Image: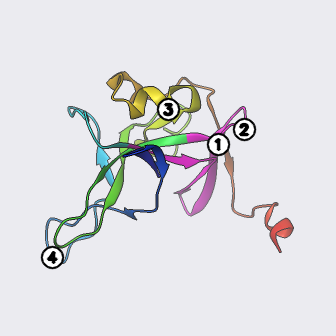
Amino acid sequence: MIRHGHDGLEMVNLRWGFEPLEPTGRPGAALRSEGRSFPTNRCLVPASEVYLPFDGRRYRVSLVDGDWFYFAGIWRPASRTWPASYAVLTIAAGEDVRPLRERQNAVILRKDRTAWLEGGDEGLLRPLPKGTFRVERADSDPRQGHLI
């Protein structure tokens, strides 16, 4: 993920998910953004697409223009019992994603990445307009043959 470090922006590998509230709980990998403020420790998780399961099938979600994007996140420093970690923020699903699920990760477009990292407008945590994302079935990825 990308964050502000001591010497400017840095890309670091941190554990995905905050320490569980209960010893047998699962790490908190996503946090609802509504009604909250995130003045510090903001981060970005780079992505070019995301795969979502729905009704026994997988769907690939990417920007229509093919550009990279980021998931809005926050990070926490290491504690006595948990390593430094991050979680992505969620919002109500936008029109493109809503047929698959009620919530989605908050997406930050490349043009807004600096505003998010520098503590800018919380209004960035909103669904993007209809037609921003391409949603397609990905049960069998035709690109897999190129990876072999």
Q: Is residue 90 magenta?
A: no
- Residue lying at the far bottom of the rendered structure: 24
**Closer to the observer: label 3 or label 4?**
3
The amino acid at mark 4 is: Pro
User: Which quadrant would residue 120 be assigned to in this image?
Assistant: top left
Marks 1,2: beta carbons within 8 A: yes
**Rendering coords of residue 76 (x, y %):** 26, 54
State which tag comes first along the sequence, 2 or 3: 2
Which residue is under mark 2? Answer: 66
Q: Which mark is residue 23?
A: 4
Tag 4: Cα neighbours inside 10 Å, few (<14), some, or many (≥20)?
A: few
Distance, label 1 to label 2, CA atoms, is 7 Å
Tag 2: Cα neighbours inside 10 Å, few (<14), some, or many (≥20)?
A: few
State which tag comes first along the sequence, 1 or 3: 1
Marks 1,4: beta carbons within 8 A: no
Which residue is under mark 3? Answer: 113
- Range of residues picked out in magenta: 43-69
For residue 110, above or below residue 71? above
Which residue is under mark 1? Answer: 62
Q: Is residue 63 magenta?
A: yes
Distance, label 1 to label 4, CA atoms, is 36 Å
The amino acid at mark 2 is: Gly
Q: Residue at x 68, y 37 (%)?
A: 67
Q: Nearer the viewer, residue 17 or 76?
A: 76
Query: Which element type, helix, strand or loop, lies under badge 3?
Result: helix
Marks 4,2: beta carbons within 8 A: no
Side of 35 relative to 125 (left or right): left
